Amino acid sequence: MQKFACVILAAGQGTRMHSEMPKPLHKVAGQSMVRHVIDAASALSPEKIIVVIGENMGDMAVEVAPHLTAVQKVANGTGGAVKPAAEHLQGFDGDVVVLFGDTPLVTSNSITKLLDKRREHSDTGLVYSAMRLDNPASYGRMVLGDGDILERIVEFKDANDDERQINLCNGGIMCADGTRLFDWLDALSNDNAQAEYYLTDLPAIARKENLSTRIVEVPAEDMEGVNSRLDLAMIEKKFQNRLRIKAMEEGITLQDPDTTYFSFDTKIAKDVTIGQSVVFGVGVEIETGANILPFCHLEQCIVHSNASVGPFARLRPNADIGENAKVGNFVEIKKTKLGRGAKVSHLSYLGDAVVGERANIGAGTITCNYDGFLKYKTVIEADAFIGSNSALVAPVTVGAGAFVGAGSVISSDVPSNALGVTRAKLLISKEWAKNFREKKQAEKEGA
């Protein structure tokens, strides 16, 4: 593939989003829309990626780093938006692909189609993406000449009745000869109702240099942009469907695909089973044969081979669940390494801990890892048994093979193979309950 650069337009404030945050920073599947576009471009190894941002968009510059940025100081149309990128493309003799920072469904395949079409014919100066729509609505119509030659793009409001019957519409993204693009942009006129410069006016300028403009058809879904919160929700749904299909094609069982939610970077090996209503935050890795039961939430964690998680479990950042380990219902784990075959079956919280192989954590056990100022570590060594409703006050170690009696508060180390218990002596007062009921019944009747 010949060299090319990408210019991503991301200066829009997105007023219809009703947000203080620039529109391309809103997230889909846990990642900003503009980063999705960057990922699609990066997969093709461009020479440069330049992101055009607005003034006072420091957060956007940080988000797209280490890629270059250029500032569009005045909102003056798509043609005006590309112009600031010229400072980074002086003397560039490859192709330039123009993308949009609010189209997170764009794929590397659609970008490749533009590049291939541009190089297919030596007389092609521009290639525009086109999509066929059953309901073209107010999209700009592509008026073709011979074959795939684009004569012009007609905006809906300017189209006549015949042109409005065309269902081939402007997809938005485009590819241009980089040696000529910025001269052509300088030749654009803003003599229109909006007083803006439009990329769709470039074909007529290229034609004056005897260079043709062609179209390449791409999936309409790839071109979908976001202008509102409703659009964002619809794009999220479509992105999730892509991730679900990919997961199942790679050998992962989704018991109810519509209720499984992935992040852009979720890594799941084959032969993993995922139950209903499972949510994966960013940074999750699941190894072969693991079973994620229904109603679990996982983020920034790893689940090793053949482990079981859930139902109703929460794995927080730096949870490391060992091979064949079990995390049961209503268990929360944070910054804890659970050894091979260890079990935390129900109703427990483990934070800032290391649990050895085959250790068993009884129901209701918690690690008291925070004193209001600092976090402390709990170590539970291999084959230890922690009785139900125990509180382990960190820093503390329970040695290998040791037992902790149910209901204990353990604030000192328990040696290996020892029993640690702080249970109070049982006191029995005979007939107390009977006497209590009689007394209270009399009080109630006399009230």
Image (tube, grey):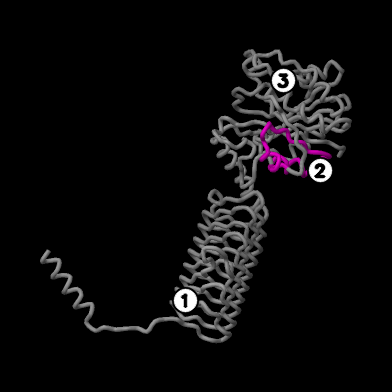
Q: In the displayed structure, would residue 296 be above or below residue 386?
A: above
Badge 2 element: loop
Nearest to the observer: residue 223 or residue 74: 74
- The percent coordinates of residue 423 (x first, y second) are 42, 81
Magenta residues span: 35-64
Label 2 sits on what residue type? Ser
Q: How far apart are the two marked residues, 2 and 1, measured between alpha carbons? A: 58 Å
Query: At 62% from the left edge and 65% from the top edge, which residue is drawn?
Result: 320
Image disc number at residue 409: 1
Residue 197, numbered label = 3
Quarter location, residue 290: bottom right
- Frontmost of labels 2 and 1 is 1
* SS category of the residue bearing label 3: loop
Query: Residue 56 location, x and y as percent?
Result: 66, 34
Q: Is residue 168 visible?
A: no
Q: Amino acid at mark 3?
A: Tyr
Q: Which residue is mark 2?
A: 45
